[in-house]
Image (cartoon, helix red, strand yellow):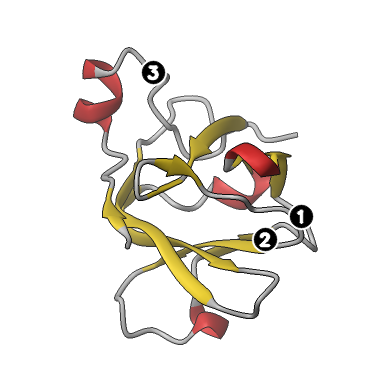
Amino acid sequence: MSSLHNILANYLVAAEKRVLHAGDDYDYQFTFLQGGVAMDLTGSKVWLTVKRQDTDLDADALLQLDSETGGITLTTPASGVITVHFASGETDDLEGVWNYDIQVKTVADKIITVARGKIEFLANITRATS
């Protein structure tokens, strides 16, 4: 059920979205569909994980955000809409292209990978994060 969704600079420019820079704050919204219908995320837990290699342990992830401890908000859960907040201090050392995925644990305890691909954080000229 997962969809390949590369979040690379050229894609973001073509989609007229703000390009991700390491050390900047961003809020990105995602809407997840299942069979063309909005996926109901009510009561679900959602993770976004960024890793060097797909096979790295979660404990070795470059970045992991979730809807329980922070970084992901279930914006309109019944409509499958989440907001991912990339905080400047969490991305300041993430220059490069990395692997990522977004997983959902439903209220029925099913784990579903809803998106995966590459994510790119470009270098900033100014390095201030505080």
- Estimate the spatial distance between the alpha carbons at disc 3 and disc 1, rounded to whole Å: 23 Å
* Proximity of marks 3 and 1: CB atoms separated by less than 8 Å: no
**Image quarter in which the C terminus is found:** top right
Q: In the image, residue 43 lies at what x, y percent?
A: 76, 60
List the residue tagged with mark 1.
70
Q: In the image, residue 12 lies at what x, y percent?
A: 30, 25
- Estimate the spatial distance between the alpha carbons at disc 2 and disc 1, rounded to whole Å: 6 Å
**Image quarter in which the N terminus is found:** bottom left
Amino acid tagged 3: Lys
Q: In this picture, is 36 found above or below 67?
A: above
* Mark sitting earlier along the chain (3/1): 3
Task: Please state the total of marks drawn on the protein image.
Answer: 3
- Image quadrant assignment for residue 7: top left
Label 2 CA crowd tier, 10 Å (few <14, some 14–19, many 20+): many
Using the image as rendered, state which of residue 110 and residue 10 is in the foreground: 110
Amino acid tagged 1: Gly
81 relative position to 68: left or right: left
Amino acid tagged 2: Asp
Question: Residue at the spot x=69%, y=62% of the render?
Answer: 44
Query: Could you say whether the residue bearing mark 3 is in a helix, strand or loop?
Result: loop
- Estimate the spatial distance between the alpha carbons at disc 2 and disc 3, rounded to whole Å: 23 Å
Residue 71 visible in the picture: yes
- Image quadrant assignment for residue 18: top left
Question: Residue at the spot x=79%, y=62% of the render?
Answer: 68
Question: Residue at the spot x=26%, y=45% of the render?
Answer: 6
Question: Residue at the spot x=28%, y=18% of the render?
Answer: 15
66 relative position to 54: left or right: right
List the residue tagged with mark 2.
66
Query: Could you say whether the residue bearing mark 1 is in a helix, strand or loop?
Result: loop
125 relative position to 55: left or right: right
List the residue tagged with mark 3.
17
* Proximity of marks 2 and 1: CB atoms separated by less than 8 Å: yes
